[in-house]
Image (tube, rainbow, N blue to C red):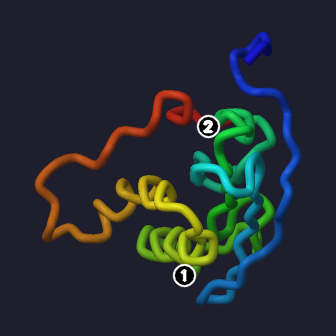
Amino acid sequence: MNVPDGLHPDIEPFDSGHLPVPGGHEIYYEQCGAPQGIPALVLHGGPGSGCSPRQRRFFDPQRYRVVLFDQRGSGRSRPLGETRHNHTGELVADIERLRRIWASSAGWSSAVPGAQHWRRPTRRRTRPPAPAPCCAASS
């Protein structure tokens, strides 16, 4: 990595589109990096911000298949600004839909534990996992 800001070089998505989800939403997604690499899911900050090209640079594109998506009502997802059918439970379900579509390697499952922690409140015994240091702040 030889970039002044310490991130990996700019990359473009090899795949992008809109995934229809229940409640009349279509979530925007994109994939960058190595198609057969270790899956890494990037969750953007909010509300309404969406993912950014800078977030593509958090992971080594030679090792990781970086999956970014704009949460319901955010960024390039449609309809923009919609708050109906837009709760934590739906976000977790959307992450699971993406996981099912692109679950071609075991590493993907490590992207979901924080969200799953909140989905099963009766099974909670600890705090959710902390975000990876490179991904703690969104842009």
Q: Earlier in the sequence, mark 1 or mark 2?
A: 1
On residue 138, which mark appears? 2
Q: Secondary structure at mark 1?
A: loop
Going by the numbered disc 2, the residue's amino acid type is Ser
Classify residue 28 by image quadrant.
bottom right
Q: Is residue 39 left or right of residue 96?
A: right
Image quadrant of residue 2?
top right
80, 107: nearer the viewer: 107
Quadrant for the C terminus, please.
Answer: top right
Please name the residue that numbered disc 1 is placed on. 85
Name the residue nearer the viewer: 109 or 69.
109
Amino acid type of the residue tagged 1 in the rendering: His
Q: Position of residue 37 (x, y in %)?
A: 65, 50
Q: Is 117 left, or right, of 62 in this rendering?
A: left
57 over 127 or under it: above or below? above
Q: Is residue 114 above or below residue 79?
A: above
Q: Residue at x 70, y 72 (%)?
A: 27
Image height check: is 58 above or below 116?
Answer: above
